[in-house]
Amino acid sequence: MSDSVAGSLAAEKNFYQEKTHKGILAWLLSTDHKRIGIMYLFSMLTFFLIAVFLGFLMRLEMLTPGETVMGAHTYNSIFTLHGVLMIFLFIIPGIPAAFGNFMLPLQIGARDVAFPRLNLLSYWFYLTGAILALLSLFTGPGPADTGWTFYAPYSLRTGTNVALAVMAAFILGFSSILTGLNFITTMHRLRAPGMSFFKMPLFCWSLYATGWIQILATPILGITLALVLMERWLGIGVFDPVKGGDPVLYQHLFWIYSHPAVYIMILPAMGILSDIIPTFARRTIFGYKAIAFSSLAIAFVGYLVWGHHMFTSGISDTSRMAFSFLTFLVAIPSAIKVFNWLATLYKGSIDVTPPFLYGISFIILFSIGGLTGLILGALATDIHVHDTYFVVAHFHYVMFGGTGFVFFAALHYWGPKMFGRMFNSKVSYIAWGFLFVGFNMLYFTMFVLGYMGMPRRYYDFLPEFHSLHVVATVGSWILIIGIIIMFVNLYRGFRYGPRATMNPWGGTTLEWKVPTPPPLENFDKIPEVKHEPYYHPRNQEERQ
Amino acid sequence: MSGASPTTGAVDSVFIFIVAISLFFLVLITFLMIYFIIKYNKKRHAKAEDIHGNTTLEIIWTVIPTIIVLFMFYFGWKGFEFIRNAPEDSMEVSVTARMWSWLFEYPNGVETDTLYVPVNTPIKLLLNSQDVIHSFYVPAFRIKEDAVPGLQNYLWFEVSKIGEYDVLCAEYCGLQHAYMLTKVKAMPQEKFEEWYEQMRQETQSTYASSDSTQMSIEASPKTSMAGSRLVQTRGCMACHSTDGSKMIGPTFQGLFGREVVLIEDEKEITITADESYIRESIMQPNKKLVKGYNPLMPSQEGQLSDEELNAIVEYLKKL
Ligand SMILES: [Cu+2]
Ligand SMILES: [Cu+2]
């Protein structure tokens, strides 16, 4: 990584050139937020690509009825692993750990996060969790086959290596908590002079809201998973009905974390989009406060809606009604954001660059994901589509169409700043075309399959579902071609491409006011902030 | 009503309502986005204008979506009320789910592995599970409810058209989850009555000949036949083969008199499978585990009567 950018700006040493240790230790022992961010980025992308490959295998299996390439047991392990890798190793640490670590101190004008060593510790937790998750595949009685949700009592009974997988998720939780804690403290204590909370870029606001979810919700996951372990090892009987336990209790506890976790995954993506749109519309954001507060509203109401994952589990009709009602409320702040982003395009001077194109796809794909969420939130319809491909399609639209596309947008947007070199834009557009077409072919088909009654986590299917499964599988191939083109292009660009300037996109936030790549301490002199984050001086001149 | 059950219409109408509104907003959002990108492209619109916000607009696009989602919530809830409240005169059938088959028990004691129902009669299913969580799902009726061990859930439907409808297990439950399928077979009223009565007589005559006051050691061909049927309806075949092949559990073939290696309290013991071992393995399957298998089988304690247990043992002896 480091060679490609060595000596890009002669005057000052960039952070790649400042090494405290030799070789790989320069990374593993570094407390520099930029190095930690890049370590997270590469680790996560590795797991993302493995999980994409597993998804490819799953779709291949669904191409024909009966056995296509693997047996039922392998299929069950593969969808479990796909979920665990994507959720716990990619999308939950996701944007905060990679881009948040790198960009947050830069955006608020700080030299590092508040607790640099804690930051490194959280990466080590991440790494330990990841290693345990991988170990669970190759040791003991074989990889877990429970689905990423580890539902009791199945997870208590199965002979597969559930304990190690659960332990991995448990440890990953600590990484998440520490990152959240670190970011919140950083924003409270280390903002540059003049940068009030309302002058922070909206990406920071989204990390702030996310941080609180990470701190407050993650311990519940830890407790729940610890109980699963104790149940498996000691047979304490909290969840096992044979011992007087309650399997529905497990679902409550699991979703009390895992629903808010959905917002850990999506809020930072919304934050990045709120930075990207004003950059390429060359104007200030519309409704700064509305977007900032809607992040907090989502984080708050998001705690109260977990029961919508349990509408068929036998909880009381009253609680089903209450959870349905609250779920509809949480839709509103997301709608507000979408309208504000649209209004930000109004009277802008729009430059359709790769980061903008990938980012703006979020609006369509996330809207589809969000609107189909209404069908899942409504009681009558959820009863029918719960646990079908409809749900699978819905959360892939939100998570992949939403967070995933913005993650790609962020790679294009901030990549040149992080690596010091530029990618080929033309190839990026081509990759986007494949991604967008393949994505919709794969997942939109799943909405139809789901409404027709195709249950999720099925190794096989009834004959009437066959043709649509073929469409979805072909879609997955197109999507993967897009992913390959995009990553090859980014890799070549960031390694061999032309040097990136300090501010290739005309961004207005502070990360564009430091050299590319940034020096170790970020700022020579901590800047004084006088303007709102999306202040385009040119627009002011024109008017006066 | 065109649906296969009144519940179908109740769900579909809510679905259409939400989809129609959603489609309107999706088209609006997409159109505005593309329109702005073209109209305010830097080629056409070189000078951007800073607009910081507009309180009136913010209020409008907060209030309107709020009203709309409240309507969606209301219709969703109303539809749900309908599909949750079974009519008073429903026929009740209890459903037992287990890895990986369904058992239906009718009020007159008849047991089947396929759900036979009369048309135009509301049916209420009482759901239970013997092992892990399953979910009873009939896509054509748009209904689903989990079968949770230790909990009795319910759902109802009423078939309006004679025919067969797929039943799927919708909650992931292990290896054969995708094959935990059966059917609802809807018959005309009279035909159902006929079938129902015939099945009742068959069930009764099976056990009338065997001695019900004590465990009969003597095998009669009739009990062994009943055993073969029980092994089917009780779902044993999902995990145990009769042809020697290894499935989730050990095969039934040649079980009687076979040497088996067991794990009890983490110690290995070897025994010869006899009648008392087979009985114990059905009633407390996880006390002594056959080496190399997982403790997945639910106990049949309270699930099988003495006669039924005898019948199964007799049947297994013959394999
Ligand atoms: Cu949720
Ligand atoms: Cu099942």
Image: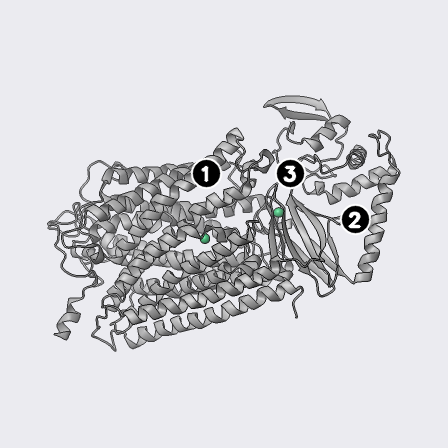
What residue would you read off at disc 2?
Answer: B108
The chosen color scheme is: one colour
Q: B204 or A49: nearer the eye?
A: B204
Discs 3 and 1 lie in a common subunit:
no
Estimate the x, y position of residue A275 in percent, counting from the top left. 27, 60
Q: Chain of mark 1?
A: A
Question: Can you see residue A1?
Answer: no
> Mark 2–mark 3 contact, CB under 8 Å?
no
Q: Which residue is mark 3?
A: B248
**Is residue A523 placed above or below B48 in the rendered structure?**
above
The answer to whether residue A521 of the structure is visible from this angle is: yes
Query: Considering the image in quadrants, where does the C terminus of chain A appear?
Result: bottom left
Q: Nearer the viewer, mark 2 or mark 3?
A: 2
Secondary structure, mark 1, is helix
Residue B194 placement (x, y as % from top left):
84, 57
Instruction: Tell me the residue that label 1 is attached to.
Output: A225
Classed neighbour count for the residue bearing mark 3: other residues with Cα under 10 Å, few (<14), some (14–19), many (≥20): some
Q: Nearer the viewer, residue A321 or A392?
A: A321
Q: In the image, are marks 2 and 3 on the same chain?
A: yes
Q: Amino acid at mark 2?
A: Asn
* Image point (14%, 74%), residue name: A542
Q: Nearer the viewer, mark 3 or mark 1?
A: 1
Dot 3 and dot 1 residues touching (CB under 8 Å): no
Q: Measured along the vertical axis of the image, is residue A297 above or below residue B229?
A: below
**Residue B38: percent from the left, percent from the top?**
31, 75
State the image coordinates of residue A158 (x, y, percent, origin top left).
56, 37
